[in-house]
């Protein structure tokens, strides 16, 4: 057993299996992938990595697996440690793009577990890569510990992200939550004594989204990175699976070496010369249902660019999915019956409705094109006349 110091959980104990998995190149790569992508452009302390987060998830899972047999404990702890190895560089900045090209999400890691050093390590400990992959995807009832409505993955990243960004919204009583989590009819449920702790988790998540995860500077930088990666795939022969195996450093170097659009984006990101908001508005600002346009974003970017007389790659349209709080379907055990969290808590119902207020459609553009692209975008999306326009000095 080896003990390491963690700024969030104090001491984390690692057994022989964990130490062997950590020493694989696939897990070591996570040291070079920032957990929050480009959030350090807003919060300079946000330089923590997927590696640290994976250790935290492993640590928290250790409390819940004690109710399993020894072999299942090993499987779940391995799954907790390996759950993020499918992430590409800059985490969520490239996640959607990689998923679009390879048709698999970052938690579908079975192929990665079946080859190389990780596979060898798992075989040495008589562990099945397929079983661990199913736990990571939350397809098994024990895997709900790692991937479900309220899981140890969510607990760790909310606490850790709040710690490193310095925001005051990560106060979650995860010890109480874990103490109240148990299995009932093969479903991971919360005891009624954990209701307030679950509410605090959802309040933290609700506040972290606009403040950190969807901060417009982070959103712009991630969109620029994603467009650069797409350009390299379509025009410079970058293989999507190669992109998935890169880390932040190797992908940044590849962008810098690009002679075209991706090279310009790399220079802008290096110097923090980010695109600006030509349009940035919530649901209430539009006369039409803009969510239906999400499938045609490339066409929209081209149309707006053509109308404004701007190169199409320099118009970025960002239409996020409709906000949803999947945690509301977590189950609470009330008088022996499993009740969804949104039926057990009025606060959770209020948060679900308020979540819509955090949604924003964005059109991002270099500063010199902001006025003319903004005018075209407002007409294209049928923006209501009284919607606030940002001053040119705003980021």
Image (cartoon, rainbow, N blue to C red):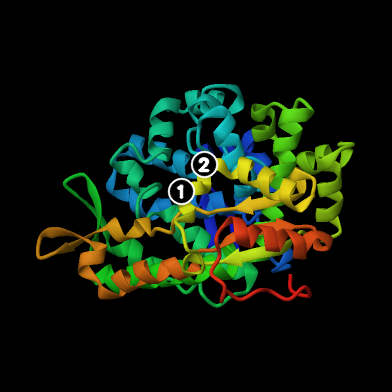
Q: In this rendering, does residue 342 appear at all?
A: yes
Q: Residues within 10 Å of mark 1 (few under 14, many from 20)?
A: few
Numbered disc 2: secondary structure: helix
Quick one: 169 or 357, which is closer to the camera? 357
What label does residue 295 carry, if any? Answer: 2
Q: Position of residue 317 (x, y in %)?
A: 63, 52
Check the image and report above or below for 235 versus 350.
above
* Closer to the camera in the image, 73 or 108: 108
| Residue 354 occupies quadrant | bottom left
Location of residue 378 in the rendering, given as x and y in whole percent from the top left corner:
62, 62
Residue 39 visible: no
x, y percent for residue 114 = 51, 23
**The residue tagged with tag 1: helix, strand or loop?**
helix
Residue shown at the point (38%, 54%) measured from the top left: 151
Q: Which mark is residue 7?
A: none
Cα distance between the residues tagged 2 and 1: 7 Å
Q: Report if the CB atoms under discs 2 and 1 are less than 8 Å apart.
A: yes
Up the image or down, 296 lies above or below 280; here it is above
Q: Is residue 290 above or below residue 211?
A: above
Crowd class of label 2 (few under 14; some 14 to 19; many from 20; radius 10 Å) = few
- Please give the residue where the numbered disc 1 appears in the rendered image: 292
């Amino acid at each position: 057993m080896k003990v390491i110091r963690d700024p969030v959980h104090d001491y984390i104990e690692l057994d022989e299996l964990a130490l062997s998995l950590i020493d694989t190149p696939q897990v070591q790569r996570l040291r070079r992938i920032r957990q929050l992508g480009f959030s350090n452009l807003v919060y300079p302390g946000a330089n923590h990595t997927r590696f640290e987060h994976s250790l935290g998830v492993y640590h928290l899972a250790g409390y819940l697996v004690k109710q399993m047999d020894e072999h299942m404990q090993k499987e779940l702890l391995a799954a907790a440690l390996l759950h993020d190895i499918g992430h590409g560089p800059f985490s969520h900045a490239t996640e959607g793009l990689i998923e679009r090209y390879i048709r698999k999400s970052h938690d579908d890691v079975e192929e990665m577990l079946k080859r190389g050093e990780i596979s060898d390590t798992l075989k040495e400990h008589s562990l099945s890569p397929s079983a661990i992959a199913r736990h990571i995807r939350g397809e098994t009832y024990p895997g709900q510990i790692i991937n479900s409505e309220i899981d140890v993955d969510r607990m760790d990243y909310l606490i850790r992200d709040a710690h490193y960004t310095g925001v005051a919204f990560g106060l979650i009583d995860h010890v109480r939550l874990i103490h109240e989590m148990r299995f009932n009819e093969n479903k991971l449920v919360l005891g009624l004594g954990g209701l307030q702790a679950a509410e605090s988790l959802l309040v933290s998540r609700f506040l972290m989204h606009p403040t950190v995860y969807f901060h417009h500077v982070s959103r712009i930088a991630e969109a620029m990175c994603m467009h650069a990666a797409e350009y390299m795939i379509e025009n410079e022969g970058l293989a999507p699976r190669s992109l998935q195996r890169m880390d932040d450093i190797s992908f940044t170097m590849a962008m810098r070496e690009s002679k075209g659009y991706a090279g310009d984006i790399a220079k802008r990101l290096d110097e923090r010369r980010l695109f600006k908001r030509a349009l940035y508005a919530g649901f209430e600002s539009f006369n039409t249902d803009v969510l239906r346009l999400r499938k045609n974003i490339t066409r929209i970017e081209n149309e707006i660019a053509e109308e404004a007389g701007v190169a199409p790659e320099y118009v970025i349209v960002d239409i996020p999915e409709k906000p949803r709080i999947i945690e509301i379907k977590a189950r609470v055990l009330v008088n022996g019956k499993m009740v969804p969290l949104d039926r057990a808590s009025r606060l959770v119902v209020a948060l679900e409705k308020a979540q819509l207020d955090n949604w924003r459609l964005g059109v991002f553009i270099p500063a010199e094109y902001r006025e003319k692209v903004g005018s075209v975008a407002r007409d294209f999306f049928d923006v209501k006349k009284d919607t606030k326009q940002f001053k040119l000095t705003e980021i």
